[in-house]
Image (cartoon, rainbow, N blue to C red):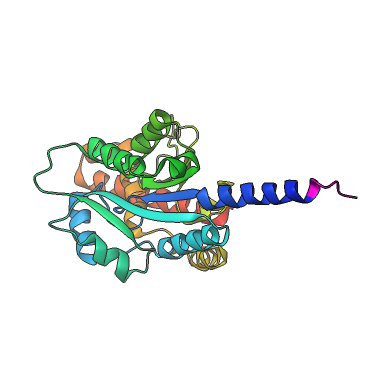
Amino acid sequence: MLSPSGPLIIQLCLLSFLINVSWAKTLVISDIDDTIKMTNNMSTSGTIVHFLDNDPFPVMPILYRDLKSQLDAKGEQVEFSYVSGGYRAIFNGDKFIKKNNFPPGKVYLRTLKSSRSTFTYKYLTITKIIEDLSAEDRQNLTIYFFGDNAAYDADVYWQLTRDLGLRSHIFIRDVQTKATFALESESLEQVKGLHYFFTERDLKKSGVEPLLGVASAGKIEELNRSKKLLPNYIRKTLKTRISKKNNCINQDNLADVVKCNKKAKKEAARLVDEYFTHE
């Protein structure tokens, strides 16, 4: 039997829980190029082609919507910010986000007058986003960072997490292929504590909840069966790595160069096939 103070204690505990829930804040901070948009920043010619295509990675809009829905269901305040090192004058980020049904959020792009490095620009921009939050929001803040290893995302997100004492989950798309495939005498290029994904299939291994939802998991399974999770330009990046490793460009004659590159292409295809064959 409850003592007279029992109901009051229960009410106070419930009130405390509701206050903490109402204060819970989640930021989803995402890069754009090579993270949610197929750009091929590691290749100048590829960047031009994919800049014109303006195609998203097909799972990412669904994944972000699933993530938002799950966080909304928990009663958390969710805010999306898209922070790119691209230039506003040559890329309409707001149109890209809206057209491809990503969750609404402010898009941060550089101006042509900006002289800051990509690292500094992103670091300062994200710092300002966090500092503009209320004290209550910062106290109960969780951040989901999404980026890629074509440039500095992993360094920016890790440095911010350390410098600001953030509670964060960092997801890095492996467009370089170096966090997934170690060629002979190489080690995988990974930073401890970061979640690397060659395709969205790898996000299931992160152990982070919430993340994937029913719709995004279903889309991953659909594209995984057809091996369409991986764009061709990332396959070509792996082939180029192997060609360089085998010193194809410096073969004795053109025939040997061609032969070496064909062998590199075959090896890249084998590695990718093994990836899709084994969960």
> On the image, which quarter does residue 37 sit in?
bottom left
For the question of whether residue 170 can be seen, the reply is: no
* 245 vs 124, nearest the viewer: 124
* 95 vs 5, nearest the viewer: 5
Decide if residue 92 is on the left or right side of residue 214: left
* 228 vs 87, nearest the viewer: 87
> On the image, which quarter does residue 107 sit in?
bottom left
Name the residue rendered at 83%, 47% in the picture: 4
Give the magenta range.
1-6
Looking at this rendering, what residue extends furthest in the front direction? 4
Task: Reply above or below: 135 against 23.
Answer: above
Query: Residue 2: where, in percent of width, then height?
Result: 86, 49
For the question of whether residue 47 can be seen, the reply is: yes
Query: Residue 98: where, in percent of width, then height?
Result: 31, 68
Name the residue rendered at 38%, 29% in the picture: 163
Query: Residue 10: where, in percent of width, then height?
Result: 74, 49
Task: Reply above or below: 274 against 214.
Answer: above
